[in-house]
Image: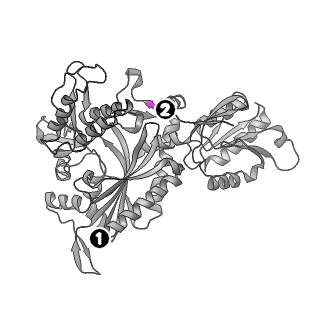
Amino acid sequence: MSVTELENLDTIVSLAKARGFIYQSSEIYGGLGAVYDYGPLGTELKRNIRDFWWTEMTRRHDNIVGLDAAILMHPKVWEASGHVEGFNDPMIDDKQSNKRYRADMLVEGHIARLRGKGKAEEADELQQLLDTAGSRNGLCEDLHQIIMDHEIRAPESGAFEWTDVRQFNLMFKTQFGATSSGDDGDVVYLRPETAQGIFVNFKNVMDTARQQVPFGIAQVGKAFRNEVVARQFIFRMREFEQMEMQYFVEPGTDEESYDTWLNKRLEWHKALGIRQHKLRIHPHPEDKLAHYAADAADIQYEYPIGWQEVEGIHNRTDFDLSQHHEYSGKKLEYYDQKKQKRYIPYVIETSIGLDRTVMMALCDAYREEEVDGDTRTVLKLNPEIAPTEVGIFPLIKKDKLQDLAHKIEEDLRGDYKVLYDESGSIGKRYRRQDEAGTPFCITVDFDGVESEGEDTVTIRYRDDMTQDRVPVSRLREVISDQTKSWKPE
């Protein structure tokens, strides 16, 4: 049997819409750029991945607790965190088309084209200039000089008429209160990350949850970034969801804790069902670290668009708590009674994009297989995160078969997401569920209903299409055993 894996992103975009995973937001009005809605199957898949993460982070650790902070926060939070001053992208406009581009990505695109033409030496020289941008006359000035010196043209129009490069803040602003005047004093921001809600609640959680360092605070929530160049489906969106855990440790123990969490998080991605050869750890070079970080690495997945970050693990030192300590005037120290000393804890951050994880799961599970001269499309998702776990089919529309099928449906519904389907041939029903990633399909036929003794059914396994005859009373046991023993192919 020949097997083809996912080769381009357009394939998964089409499947996501056709099967009800993900839609373009406001599509009937022409859509809203880089904003997406999750359909019936997508909602279930996203929720299952979220629960898989939450269970791992909070249920399996007695020193990690949950939080659900508000999206709107006091504007001084973002001053203390550095987002008001420094959360920017360098932008440049094509005067002819009025399109806006990220200046560094324009240069990266030009480098890729040079390499494609075999001009490796020229590409290397330009890469060196890009890597050192900001060290000569400032980031914006250096990027503009590179674009002008190398005559980098606009991708769409081909024009060479650029504005200056300037910084563009990525935070969405809104006005606070019914009588807001529009002055800066009324401005609040939609949070661009969920981490700050954890930091400003550090003392509240420590006091009320009676936690001692080391301990962690986990949160899942929406964040918003006014990405000017947003693309690649749900990989980079303006409204997205993060799953973050901030782990507070004693200074001096942070390096060991960082290594521990980096390994733990990589193992979680494997447990999710992602194939090992598609994952890698990409440490940040020392000269590329964020100003607050002592160490950082990305867990990357090989998407059809190349190796990209899914999760970041960072040693944020005491930067965040120290900043809020200073700006708020409130003590955010920890007192260690055993050692009788006070200190501001260091933070090990694990930050994963939920939407990127959904996209990773879909990409990694996608297969096209030749079966008896036909092609079947199948999503080989981990049964624990599959949007529908069990399909239930009466072979034909006969009362005896339908009655037992409905009885099985009712019995399993409390523990599994099930789908009853009696329309079309059994082969077409299997194919529909293969595309949806349903790992188990149960068929009720006359051989099982009219035989002597206990009723039996056929259970068909998505990944290899094999079938077993199973007594109805053992269905739960078989599904549970198969789920626990599942491995990615």
Which one is in front in this view, the residue at disc 2 or the one at disc 1? 2
Which residue does the image show at 78% across and 32% down from the upper left?
A: 398
How far across and down, in percent of the image, does residue 187 sit?
16, 40
Say whether residue 369 is left or right of residue 468. Answer: left
Q: Is residue 57 visible?
A: no
Please, what secondary structure does the residue beneath circle 2 have? loop
Taking the magenta stretch, the answer to whether it contains residue 56 is: no
Q: How many marks?
A: 2
Please, what secondary structure does the residue beneath circle 1 have? loop
How far across and down, in percent of the image, does residue 117 sit?
37, 29
Marking on residue 172 = none
- Chain part drawn in magenta: 17-23
Say whether residue 376 is left or right of residue 63. Answer: right
Between residue 4 and residue 262, name the one nearer to us: 4
- As drawn, 58 above or below 234: below
Give the mark nearer the N terminus: 2 vs 1.
2
Marking on residue 8 = 2
Marking on residue 250 = 1
Quarter-of-image position of residue 204: bottom left
Between residue 296 and residue 159, name the one nearer to us: 159
**Given the image, on which type of amino acid does mark 1 rest?**
Glu
How far across and down, in percent of the image, does residue 175 sit?
19, 37
Quarter-of-image position of residue 461: top right
